[in-house]
Amino acid sequence: MKKALIFGITGQDGSYLAEFLLGKGYEVTGVTRRVSINTTERISHILPKLNIVEGDITDAFNVMRVIEETEPDEVYNLAAQSHVGTSFSQTHLTLDVTAGGVWNILEAIRHSPRCFDMRFYQASTSELFGKNYDETENGEKFQNEKTQFMPQSPYAVAKMAAHNMVRIYREGYGMHASSGILFNHESERRGEHFVTRKITKWVGEFVNFKRAVRKEYNLKIIETVFTEDKIMFKCGNTGEVLSKFGKLRLGNLDAYRDWGHAADYVRAMWMMLQQDSPDDYVIATGESHTIREFLDAAFNAVEIEDWSDYVMIDPEFYRPAEVDYLRGCPRKAKSVLQWEPEISFEELAYRMVKHDVKTQGLQRPDLQKVPANSFKTRQIHMSDVQEEGQESMAQCPPHNEMEFG
Ligand code: NDP
Ligand code: GDR
């Protein structure tokens, strides 16, 4: 039985990779940090099948001990301070974990008597390209393995140091060490502070909140009224304000990202380590969309066609430096690894919204009742008034904004 060791098993990718490797018959060990709350939620369904050891990649001795004791055939490093925005305010920590941690793993493998029996995967990123791209003859922009790096954040600088270190250990010491230059990949398990999940979680909360207001007041008519930063619910008959909900606050909506599903991407990680020779590969869908387009897909999934009243721009979420355009060319991964993504952009957004509408429905929302006339309104969404005025809640089950099979 092959043995795999995963640093970062509690993260989005770690959980999918662990599932995937268990499915392939691997014995899987995951490294988790000792923290004061439970961080194993994403792997709770497979926990009994995993070996869990405590560790932190910034602790060189600990990393060495874990590698020695578990004797893995394959080592996957997914651990990182992975939030680009946060890296601007926690620069040192980001460098320590996201770059320094990789040194520790590489050194531990190099000094191990089993050095050449182990294969290593490093989670590199499209953030390495930053502002840079190449162009086809038709002027289409893309990034591939040959595109020059121009990092735009402390996170990307740390990942670039790690990426180069992996290459140096591969070439200098002959280690089987590969880096996957993965473009953005999301999922139902995506961290809640990344833009896609932030959007779908908000949509899930909003849909369930509105349902709860209708149920609570047994309303025939509900008006949705938009203020600068809130969405107010009023009784359509009396005009009484019933409840309010904060708008979705976002930063730059014009950046382009090449978004895939994490389940497809962890398959590529494993495929890289099955090659006779180590190498670097771009993993991407080849399609690029703006955050506006993701908003379209997410809100359309709950039958809201125009999201502009529901979203507000908050400068807090702008970054000091931005990556404007990412679109990966996965040709090498397709021809060498035979890797293909299976989940489309539309399917990805739909799955995430479906998941968040369902899970948020299990929470009991705080309706935050507000006294009448305690705010100034800006605009009224008349379509809501007309559409919802047709229903009688006395006879109908709670309103379903979306019907999922
Ligand atoms: P997450 O942020 O979801 O997971 C990060 C993981 O790293 C968590 O398990 C976290 O543990 C762990 N970790 C953080 N600091 C340490 C530390 N000091 N020691 C040990 N473990 C630590 O990231 P993703 O799953 O989305 O991404 C996986 C990797 O791929 C990351 O390296 C990321 O930078 C990279 N990447 C991700 C892309 C994406 O679109 N998702 C694209 C390209 C690259 P804990 O749960 O305790 O916080
Ligand atoms: P990214 O992902 O920076 O590409 O890094 P993120 O989802 O954080 O941002 C994508 C784009 O959305 C814009 N944006 C916002 N982002 C966040 N997080 N929150 C907001 O409110 C918001 N509003 C607009 C951002 O400015 C950006 O342009 C991810 C991480 O997983 C990295 O670890 C990984 O390496 C890269 O993807 C590839």
Image (spheres, helix red, strand yellow):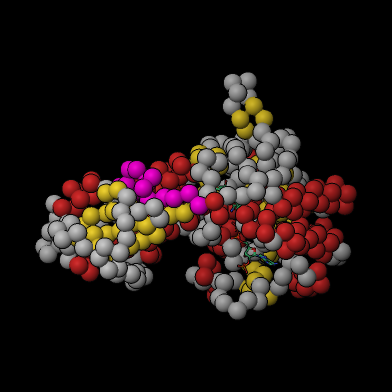
The one nearer the camera, 68 or 288, is 288
Q: Position of residue 95 (x, y in %)?
A: 75, 59
The N terminus sits in image quarter = bottom right
The one nearer the camera, 38 or 154, is 154
Q: Position of residue 364 (x, y in %)?
A: 34, 71
Q: Is residue 252 left or right of residue 63?
A: left
Q: Position of residue 116 (x, y in %)?
A: 82, 57
Q: Is residue 303 magenta?
A: yes
Residue at the image point whose x is 12% and y is 64% from the top = 394
Q: Is residue 386 left or right of residue 109?
A: left
Image-quadrant location for residue 134: top right
Q: Is residue 240 magenta?
A: no
The C terminus sits in image quarter = bottom left
- In the displayed image of the protein, which residue is found farthest to the top? 137
Q: Position of residue 77 (x, y in %)?
A: 69, 59
Ligand 1 located in image quadrant = bottom right
Q: Kindly tell me whether residue 205 is visible in this rendering.
A: yes
Numbered label tally = 0
Residue at the image point whose x is 87% and y is 64% from the top = 111
Image-quadrant location for residue 245: bottom left
Residue at the image point whose x is 46% and y is 42% from the top = 292
Q: Is residue 141 left or right of residue 251?
A: right
Per the rendered image, the range of residues in magenta is: 301-314
Residue at the image point whose x is 26% and y is 63% from the top = 373
Q: Kindly tell me whether residue 4 is visible in this rendering.
A: no
| Majority secondary structure of magenta residues | loop
- In the displayed image of the protein, which residue is found farthest to the bottom? 36
The one nearer the camera, 43 or 158, is 158
The one nearer the camera, 1 or 34, is 34
Instruction: Identify whether 298 is placed above or below 44.
Output: above
